[in-house]
């Protein structure tokens, strides 16, 4: 059993530091930048996120969840059913077989602490993101924790994200958020929205 399978199997939604009852920034950025409810959207490292419940509720129809944990995807599928497509793999091993108009990632990228991993992520992202498509990322900010769920993490400012993902991806929006864990810890997130200029 993998690391994240154990995390999901041994905890409930409210016991996970990354859980959000309302995924506010994610939903707001997607709604503001996806101009059609039929836009193809993939969530990288979806876990069992409530984001899909909210996207379905407002009318989005082409949704894909990608996560390394089969337990996370099973939990998600038991809640939202077959209206979402499911891909169980690591982002670093994913081979996209289509392009997506929106790629969303909240809290995966910061677990990639090696330059080779970060470069591989960017390579796969650029293959998956449609021309003119939108990339929404939420990752630990400069004042965020230096580890999460027992693993080391990297921290990124908006300017650092812009430098890393440019020049093909152009920053069009950004913000900082303080996420409060179920036990009251506060974590700074950097949010950035990019448009694929290709």
Image: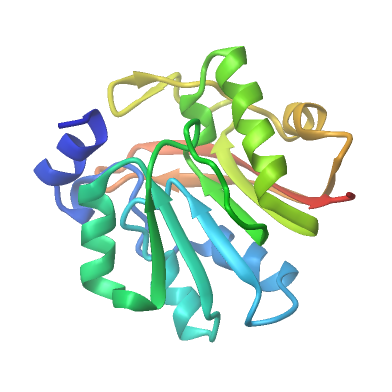
Residue 141 percent across, percent down from the top left? 59, 31
- Front residue of 128/156: it is 128
- Based on the displayed image, in which of its 4 quarters is residue 149 positioned? top left
- Front residue of 60/13: it is 60
Q: Is residue 52 left or right of residue 160?
A: left
Q: Is residue 46 left or right of residue 166?
A: left
Q: Is residue 45 left or right of residue 4?
A: right
| Image vertical order of residue 122 relative to residue 132, above or below | above
What's the coloring here? rainbow
Residue 85 percent across, percent down from the top left? 41, 66
- The residue located at (51%, 23%) in the rendering is 112
- The residue located at (19%, 44%) in the rendering is 8
- Front residue of 118/92: it is 92
Residue 53 percent across, percent down from the top left? 39, 74
- Front residue of 147/38: it is 38
Image quadrant occupied by the N terminus: top left
- Based on the displayed image, in which of its 4 quarters is residue 32 positioned? bottom right
Q: Residue furthest front?
A: 97
| Image vertical order of residue 117 relative to residue 49, above or below | above
Q: How many marks?
A: 0
Q: Residue furthest left?
A: 10
- The residue located at (22%, 55%) in the rendering is 13
Residue 131 percent across, percent down from the top left? 82, 56
- Based on the displayed image, in which of its 4 quarters is residue 89 positioned? top left
- The residue located at (52%, 17%) in the rendering is 113
């Amino acid at each position: 059993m993998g690391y994240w399978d154990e995390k999901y199997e041994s905890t409930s939604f409210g016991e996970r530091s990354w859980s959000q009852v309302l995924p506010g920034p994610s939903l707001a950025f997607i709604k503001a930048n996806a101009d059609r409810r039929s836009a193809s959207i993939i969530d990288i490292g979806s876990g069992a996120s409530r984001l899909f419940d909210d996207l379905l509720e407002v009318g989005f129809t082409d949704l894909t969840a990608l996560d390394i944990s089969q337990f996370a995807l099973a939990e998600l599928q038991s809640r939202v059913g077959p209206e979402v497509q499911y891909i169980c793999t690591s982002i670093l091993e994913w081979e996209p077989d289509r392009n997506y108009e929106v790629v969303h990632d909240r809290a995966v990228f910061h677990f990639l602490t090696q330059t080779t991993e970060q470069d591989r992520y960017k390579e796969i992202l650029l293959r998956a993101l449609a021309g003119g498509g939108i990339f929404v990322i939420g990752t630990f900010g400069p004042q965020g924790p230096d580890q999460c769920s027992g693993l080391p993490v990297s921290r990124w400012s908006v300017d650092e994200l812009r430098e890393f993902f440019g020049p093909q991806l152009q920053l069009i929006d950004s913000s900082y958020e303080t996420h409060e864990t179920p036990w009251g810890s506060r974590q700074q997130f950097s949010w950035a929205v990019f448009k694929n200029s290709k």
